[in-house]
């Protein structure tokens, strides 16, 4: 098969379009003919490398996959050859207390396709049968591949961790990102008032089309000041944070008394600081969130199929142009998802 492979960490230039061995599946696995693979910031971090995370090399990245079943293992019963599928990106042991209780994103062996195992930037991919999700028939492969990681993450952050309630005010950082554009739709679906930030007026215009009620251009407006103005000095009930140190102080200062800040990432840095006096006196909550459960993704997929949520595709590259797609994603020019067509 053809695949994107890197043998060392570095810039986009380490990504090579080359021949790779076809995957061999186990009895409980399927072989998927990949039709589209959406990129995430996780792909950039995997490529760049982290001293604390030993990525096996050579490596094939890519977590968000849509395609067709090419082969099934001997024990597979729920999907058939030729069936269209979207893959849940999270791969777990399926046996531990977390997995059997439905909290599989807390599995100690949790990883993502394309993270500690090979991923979907290839013509073929092996995956557990349990990771096969129903395919929303009205979507293209590129649209379908744009759903799993960001919608699952945003759903878990807002509904499970932050326990968002109808009528609450939500500040969503980075509206132009995949997870930000998903969060806007989810928050509006639950009748929250959405304040969205982005770095260009064009991105803010698109955020408005997705359902954002108020807009902040963080390039020329102070986030905390605008939040105070919009909310009558009260602050927001929930801050949806995934940017990191660049926005942390503004995010924390934007919370109303009793507010919840939920975070899933640290794109601009992880060394955030908190004034504990402010934390306890205003009775604030800081919540970490990581991915989501397969059951949550099943619910998201039903809402996508019914037209309630729509994946936002910014630009499509051919698989062979994966290096250019990485460079484009790193430029932060996109609104929504960058996708590889295979």
Image: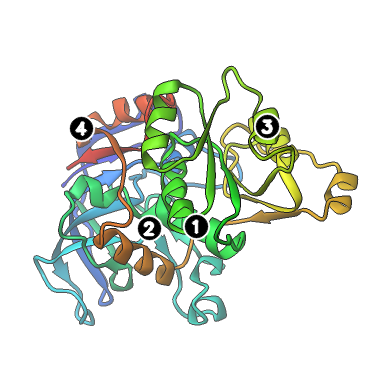
Residue assigned mark 4: 320
Q: Which mark is residue 89?
A: 2
- The residue shown at (49%, 56%) is 191
Q: Earlier in the sequence, mark 1 or mark 4?
A: 1
- Label 4 secondary element: helix
Q: Extreme front residue here?
A: 232
In-front residue for pair 319/222: 222
* Number of residues whose C-alpha sits closer than 10 Å to that of mark 3, classed few (under 14), some (14–19) or many (20 or more): few
Position of residue 328 measured from the top left corner of the image (x, y, whole percent): 35, 25
In-front residue for pair 39/219: 219
> In front of the other: label 3 or label 4?
3
Q: For the residues marked 1 and 3, what is the alpha-carbon distance in whole angstroms?
A: 33 Å
Residue assigned mark 1: 291
* Number of residues whose C-alpha sits closer than 10 Å to that of mark 1, classed few (under 14), some (14–19) or many (20 or more): many
What colouring does the structure picture have? rainbow
Q: Earlier in the sequence, mark 2 or mark 3?
A: 2
Residue assigned mark 3: 229
């Amino acid at each position: 098969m053809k695949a994107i492979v890197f043998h060392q960490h570095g810039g986009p230039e380490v990504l090579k379009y080359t021949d790779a061995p076809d995957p061999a599946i186990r009895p409980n696995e399927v072989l998927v003919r990949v039709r589209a693979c959406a990129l995430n910031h996780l792909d950039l971090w995997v490529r760049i490398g982290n001293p604390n995370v030993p990525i096996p090399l050579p490596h094939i990245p890519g977590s968000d996959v849509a395609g067709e079943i090419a082969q099934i293992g001997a024990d597979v019963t729920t999907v058939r050859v030729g069936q269209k599928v979207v893959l849940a990106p999270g791969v777990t042991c399926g046996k531990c207390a977390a997995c059997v209780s439905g909290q599989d994103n807390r599995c100690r062996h949790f990883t993502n396709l394309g993270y500690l195992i090979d991923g979907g930037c290839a013509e073929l991919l092996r995956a557990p049968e349990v990771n096969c999700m129903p395919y929303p028939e009205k979507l293209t492969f590129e649209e379908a591949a744009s759903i799993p990681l960001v919608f699952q993450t945003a759903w878990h952050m807002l509904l499970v961790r932050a326990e968002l309630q109808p009528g609450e005010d939500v500040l969503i950082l980075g509206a132009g990102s995949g997870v930000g554009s998903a969060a806007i739709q989810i928050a509006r679906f639950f009748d929250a008032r959405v304040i969205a930030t982005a770095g260009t007026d064009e991105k803010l215009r698109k955020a408005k089309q997705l359902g954002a009620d108020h807009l902040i251009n963080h390039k020329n407006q102070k986030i905390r000041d605008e939040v105070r103005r919009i909310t009558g000095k009260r602050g927001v009930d929930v801050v949806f944070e995934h940017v990191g140190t660049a926005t942390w102080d503004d995010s924390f200062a934007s919370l109303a008394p009793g507010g919840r800040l939920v975070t899933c990432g640290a794109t601009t840095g992880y060394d955030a600081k908190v004034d504990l006096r402010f934390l306890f006196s205003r009775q604030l909550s800081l919540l970490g969130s990581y991915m989501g459960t397969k059951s949550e993704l099943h619910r998201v997929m039903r809402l996508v199929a019914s037209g309630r949520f729509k994946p936002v595709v910014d630009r499509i590259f051919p698989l062979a142009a994966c290096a250019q797609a990485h460079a484009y994603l790193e430029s932060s020019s996109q609104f929504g998802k960058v996708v590889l067509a295979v």
